Structure formats: C-alpha cells, structure tokens
Amino acid sequence: MTTQAPGAGTDWSIQEIARLAGTTSRTLRHYDDIGLLAPSRVGHNGYRYYDGTALVRLQRILLLRELGVGLPAVAEILGRDDQSNPAAQAHALRTHLDALRAEQQRLARQIASVERTITTMEGGGELMADEMFDGFDHTKHEAEVTERWGAEAYRTGDAWWRGLSAQDKAAYQERTRQLGADWTAAAQAGVAPESDEAQALARRHVEWLGSIPGTPGHGAAPVKEYVVGLGEMYVADERFAANYGGEEGARLVRDALAVYADRNL
C-alpha cells in the first residue's frame, strides 16, 4: 500500500492549529525559533501557516513530549527522520500508536474497576476486593515470576515493594516510566543496538534490573542469562513490549541488552 503525503495544498493558521492541538501560538512560535517546527509558509501579514506535513510533525512532537522526552531529544529524534518520506513518518507514528493503545488498555481496566466500586457503594452492595484493583495490582504476575525465578524471588520482591514509602514507590515508577520512554524514543529514532546511545540505555536497564530485590544478581551485576532471557521475553510477550512502544522497541531492547551482556557480563 502506498502512503501519500498528507494535506497537500491545504494549510491552517497558527491560531487554528494552537486551538486544535490544545497548545498556544506562543509555543508554536517557540518551536519555530528553536528549529523544531517551521511554518509551511508565512503570509504577507506575517501570520504563520502550517500544512499537513507540518501537522504530522507537530503530532509527533506532542506525543514525544507526553512521553517525557525533552525538546533537545525531540529535535534529535525528528532530525534523523526523512521528512519527505510519508511511509517513514507513518511507521514512526505506528510505534506511537502501539504505546498509546497499551496505555489505553491499562486505563480502561482502572476505569472499569473504579466504576464497579462506585456502583457497588451507591447500591449498598458488598465490595469485592478482587474486582477493585484491576489495572493497579503489581502482583498480577506472581505465578509467572514464581515459575521463572522461584517463590523466594517473588516473596523478596513483593516484600521490598510493600515496604517502600509512597514517595519511594513514585520515584521507582517514574524511573521505570522514563526508561521505557527513552527506549521508545530510541527505537523511533532508528538507533542501532550496538550504538553508544543504545548501550548507555542498556547499562541503565541492567542497573535498574539489579536494583530490584529478588532478581538474579541483585546488588551486583545481573547474570548474563537473566538479562538476555528478559530481552527475549520483552519481544515474545506483548504486555512487556508495550512498555517500550511495541514490538519494534522491544526488539531494540532485546538486541541492545544482548550486545551489552556479551561485552560486560
């Protein structure tokens, strides 16, 4: 299937785009000033106008920003793209779409859980604990963890998590989220697994793995087989792949971890 360039011959004013995108004209002008998003044309009155290609670029900028990617990194990622190739742009957006769908599924489960709680409370019914925390529970993979690494590994990790303060839990979740966002951004940028950038991410990933009690190699360098095996699991299981923007991101994590493990573990 041929992918066509969007919106040729059509453009929108900066005010229209700011309103539709939920941003401000000032922000769009700033993106122009830093070379991130130039208008397609500037009218005789000095107004900026944006065509379909510029809108696709803005959509990607906003998606990357929601992932927590800073403006310099956004510029680097988009700077590697072939802006004249609609198929390449569509492929990059498909990676975004995979991540958004995974988040949508997680939020849908949480929404359904809260709705059930409200309905039960308003109806005077009995609250069912096993229905209240779908989408929240960090123990939902207990059976898998136990099967892969043993009951002691699960008990140790579970006790560690339950013992964290709310602040420490939030910090750990943010660390995890940022690592996933950085892997997703690297995959979208076409970073090679053996590159310095990917290997720096692999080192962070291995350090993150080693920080979790109960995992093989906690407190030291995780064992090579554990790291390589996790990489394979990220690709094989779409639940894990979603943390890295989908299968493409998971493949980058797997391949980069394999290179790192060969070199360092």
Image: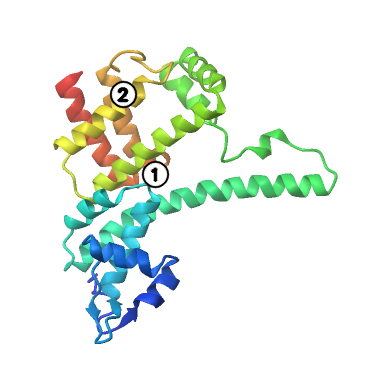
* Residue drawn where x is 83% and y is 42% of the image: 125
Seen in the picture, residue 118 relative to 173 is either above or below; the reply is below
* Mark 1, other Cα within 10 Å: few <14 / some 14–19 / many ≥20: many
Circle 2 residue? 207
Q: From this viewpoint, is residue 141 visible?
A: no
Q: Position of residue 50 (x, y in %)?
A: 29, 76
* Residue drawn where x is 32% and y is 48% of the image: 69
Circle 1 residue? 242
Left or right relative to 94: residue 147: right
Rendered image quadrant of residue 203: top left
Q: Position of residue 25 (x, y in %)?
A: 37, 70
* Mark 2, other Cα within 10 Å: few <14 / some 14–19 / many ≥20: some
Q: Position of residue 196 (x, y in %)?
A: 15, 35
- Identify the element where label 1 is drawn: helix
CB under 8 Å between callouts 2 and 1?
no
Q: Position of residue 75 (x, y in %)?
A: 23, 54
Labels 2 and 1: the sequence-earlier one = 2
Three-letter amino acid code at disc 2?
A: Glu
Three-letter amino acid code at disc 1?
A: Ala
Q: How is the image coloured?
A: rainbow
